Image (spheres, rainbow, N blue to C red):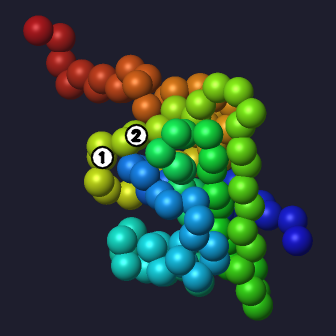
Amino acid sequence: MILDFEKLDIYIRPGITDMRKAVNGLSLAVNEQMNLDPFSESLFISCNRERKILKALYWDRNGFCLWQKRLEKHRYPWLMTKEEVLKLDFDQLKMLLSGIDFFKAHERINYKKIS
């Protein structure tokens, strides 16, 4: 299975996720806590309290795929307090996996007129 991340919807669940959860527990969290469809063509990413483990859940035609990455050193940038689900693009996913904290990046300013 090869994923086309450019066409994939990528969602993260801010806050803490119990990493003892496997496919059933994570798909239930996607459905009930994120209010999203775990069977959609989407990637759902969760992080543990220490911000060292990420799990990604994906439905592939006839079954779930579950990936885990555990950092041996350092931590992932992660929003621990925001309650709503965030949608990422592929570039943001690459930054997240590289440890770049794009959550604190400057927001774009769109001026309408000069004052």
- Measured as percent of width and height from the top left, residue 73 is found at 70, 27
- Say if 26 sits above or below 70 in the image: below
Rendered image quadrant of residue 103: top left
Rendered image quadrant of residue 38: bottom right
Q: Amino acid at mark 2?
A: Leu
The residue at 50%/60% (across/down) is 18
Q: Amino acid at mark 1?
A: Lys
The residue at 21%/25% (across/down) is 112
The residue at 30%/43% (across/down) is 81
- Measured as percent of width and height from the top left, residue 41 is found at 63, 74
Of the pair 53 and 45, the residue shown nearer to us? 53
Q: Is residue 69 left or right of residue 96?
A: right
| Quadrant the N terminus occupies | bottom right
Rendered image quadrant of residue 100: top right
- Say if 37 sits above or below 45 in the image: below
Which residue has dot 2 on it? 79
The dot on residue 24 is none
Going by the picture, which residue comes out furthest to the front?
20
Q: Residues within 10 Å of mark 1 (few under 14, many from 20)?
A: few
Of the pair 33 and 95, the residue shown nearer to us? 33
Tag 2 secondary structure: loop
- Measured as percent of width and height from the top left, residue 26 is found at 54, 72
Going by the picture, which residue comes out furthest to the bottom?
62
| CB within 8 Å, label 2 to label 1 | yes
Which residue has dot 1 on it? 82
Q: How many marks?
A: 2
Going by the picture, which residue comes out furthest to the right?
1
| Quadrant the C terminus occupies | top left
- Say if 112 sits above or below 15 in the image: above
Tag 1 secondary structure: loop
Of the pair 108 and 85, the residue shown nearer to us? 85
Can you see residue 93?
yes
